[in-house]
Image (cartoon, helix red, strand yellow):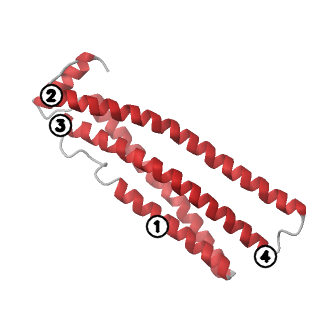
């Protein structure tokens, strides 16, 4: 960011309730992405519903326990998502200060969700892989060596995909940490009336 942009923001911070247009656009863009991200909640819900239907059509303790476990994971994820996104949807006022504070809250929210995602991904992956292995084993589908090899390859594939996604998220996490440091510094400078 250039010094003249900082000076404009500082004057607007102190004086008028107007907000720099680039800051408004960025916040609006993040809001749209956040709403699109809410659609990602549909996939786990569909998987849990399909698993529940399969478990209750062919009831055995293992499949019912597996379906209930998936619902517990979904509930924990939704609960975290609701609590983590509180106060990150709209600025408190139409001022530069409110928009900067909202951007800071969104950065912190993303960093919290990254930590939660890493832990939840590992736990959920282990739960699903162990659950699937137990269900296949108890159903007698693992009788030959080829079956074990197919299961091992699918497990390795799953772990590889999860690891790759977490790697991509960690890159975004680093960028978010840098952005948060910049926003905190900007907030400090604007509050103190500094232009450098």
Q: Which element type, helix, strand or loop, lies under badge 1? A: helix
Q: Which residue is mark 2?
A: 192
Q: Which residue is mark 1?
A: 75
- Residue 173 x, y percent position in the rendering: 46, 39
Relative horizontal placement of residue 58, taking residue 94 as reference (left or right):
right
Q: Which residue is mark 3?
A: 95
| Mark 1 vs 2, N-terminal side | 1
Which of discs 4 and 2 lies nearer the camera? The answer is 2
Quarter the N terminus occupies: top left
| Mark 4 vs 2, N-terminal side | 4
Residues at marks 4 and 2 touching, judged by CB atoms closer than 8 Å = no
The residue positioned 35% from the left and 35% from the top of the image is 180
Q: Which mark is residue 147?
A: none
- Marks 4 and 2, Cα distance to the nearest angstrom? 68 Å
- Marks 1 and 3, Cα distance to the nearest angstrom? 36 Å
| Mark 4 vs 1, N-terminal side | 1
- Marks 4 and 1, Cα distance to the nearest angstrom? 28 Å
Q: Nearer the viewer, residue 29 or 153?
A: 153
Residues at marks 1 and 3 touching, judged by CB atoms closer than 8 Å = no
Which of discs 1 and 3 lies nearer the camera? The answer is 1
Q: Which element type, helix, strand or loop, lies under badge 4? A: loop
The residue positioned 52% from the left and 42% from the top of the image is 169
């Amino acid at each position: 960011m250039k010094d003249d942009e900082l000076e404009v923001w500082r004057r607007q911070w102190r004086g008028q309730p107007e907000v720099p247009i680039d800051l408004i656009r960025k916040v609006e863009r993040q809001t749209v992405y956040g709403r699109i991200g809410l659609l990602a909640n549909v996939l786990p819900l569909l998987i849990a519903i399909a698993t529940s239907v399969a478990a209750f059509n062919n009831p055995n303790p293992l499949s019912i326990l597996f379906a209930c476990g998936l619902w517990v994971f979904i509930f924990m994820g939704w609960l975290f998502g609701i609590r983590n996104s509180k106060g990150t949807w709209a600025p408190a006022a139409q001022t530069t200060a409110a928009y900067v504070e909202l951007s800071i809250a969104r950065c912190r929210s993303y960093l919290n969700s990254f930590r939660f995602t890493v832990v939840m991904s590992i736990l959920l992956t282990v739960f699903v892989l162990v659950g699937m292995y137990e269900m296949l084993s108890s159903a007698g589908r693992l009788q030959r060596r080829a079956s074990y090899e197919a299961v091992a390859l699918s497990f390795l594939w799953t772990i590889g995909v999860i690891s790759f996604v977490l790697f991509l998220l960690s890159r975004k996490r680093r960028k978010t940490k840098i952005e948060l440091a910049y926003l905190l510094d900007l907030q400090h400078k604007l509050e103190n009336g500094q232009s450098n």
